[in-house]
Amino acid sequence: MNYLAHLHLAYISNTSLPGALLGEYARGSIDPRLPSSLQIGIQLHRRIDSFTDAHPLHAGAVRNLPSPFRRYGGIIMDMMFDHFLASHWSRYHPWPLDDFIGYSHRQLQPDAHWPEAMVTLVERLKQYRLLESYRSLEGITLAIARIDPRFRRPTPLPRCAPLLQQQYSAMEQAFLGFYPELQRFVLDQSRALGLAG
């Protein structure tokens, strides 16, 4: 899953929103010097990603992508699932999306435990209102295209718009079947840690 989903899942599981994003950057063993809230956030982030990648609805949506997009299918589907979360937001959260994003921005205050890349990410999320842009297909298509420069060689990601339009309904149905299962998984994981009510 991508940023919006990780923040939402952190909220509903009563875990750290910064920890949820820190999971994007922490590699290898979790640093025991980190505050426990960040350690739990990283751990939950990894479990969410593993659950998502192995889930038949997510994996099937990736397999349905044609070459050369299938190679980048995990990225495409994680981004599209954030789009569907944003566009169906009222199903999953009582607050308006803009209110939740504002809350998330307030929770995401850099500290000494953040790597520079995460500081930069959060600055961009806030400055360019990136999470709000995920609501529209045009916004998420642009967000996917902007991932291309992170790779050493050019990717097909900037040319994904026709594919997203063609497979939109199938991707949406995959998300709608998948996300409630992911929510239940996350709540089960957080209850096991004594964090969710």
Image (cartoon, rainbow, N blue to C red):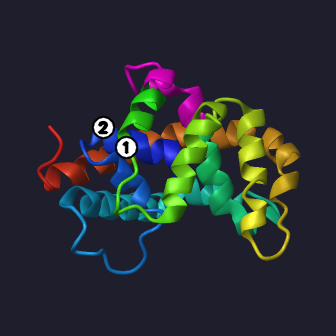
Q: What residue type is labelled 1?
A: Leu
How far apart are the alpha carbons under marks 1 and 2? Answer: 5 Å
- Quadrant of the image occupied by residue 162: top right
Front one among 32 and 3: 32
- Quadrant of the image occupied by residue 31: bottom left
The reply to whether the magenta stretch includes residue 92 is yes
Looking at the rendering, the stretch of residues picked out in magenta corresponds to 84-99
State the SS at label 2. helix
Question: Looking at the image, which residue is at 78% across and 34% down?
Answer: 138
Residue 101 locus on image (x, y percent): 47, 31
Pointers 1 and 2 in contact (CB under 8 A)? yes
Q: Is residue 111 above or below residue 169?
A: below
Residue 111 locus on image (x, y percent): 35, 55
Q: Can see residue 133?
A: yes
State the SS at label 1. helix
Question: Looking at the image, which residue is at 63% across and 48% down?
Answer: 79
Q: Which amino acid does label 2 sit on?
A: Ile
**Circle 2 Cα neighbour tier, 10 Å, few/some/many (<14 / 14–19 / ≥20):** some
Q: Is residue 33 above or below residue 179?
A: below
Residue 24, disc? none
Front one among 14 and 173: 14
Residue 152 locus on image (x, y percent): 78, 76
Question: Looking at the image, which residue is at 40% across and 44% down?
Answer: 108
Q: Can see residue 2?
A: no
Residue 9, disc? 1
Q: Mark 2 points at which residue?
A: 12
In what quadrant of the picture does the C terminus appear?
top left
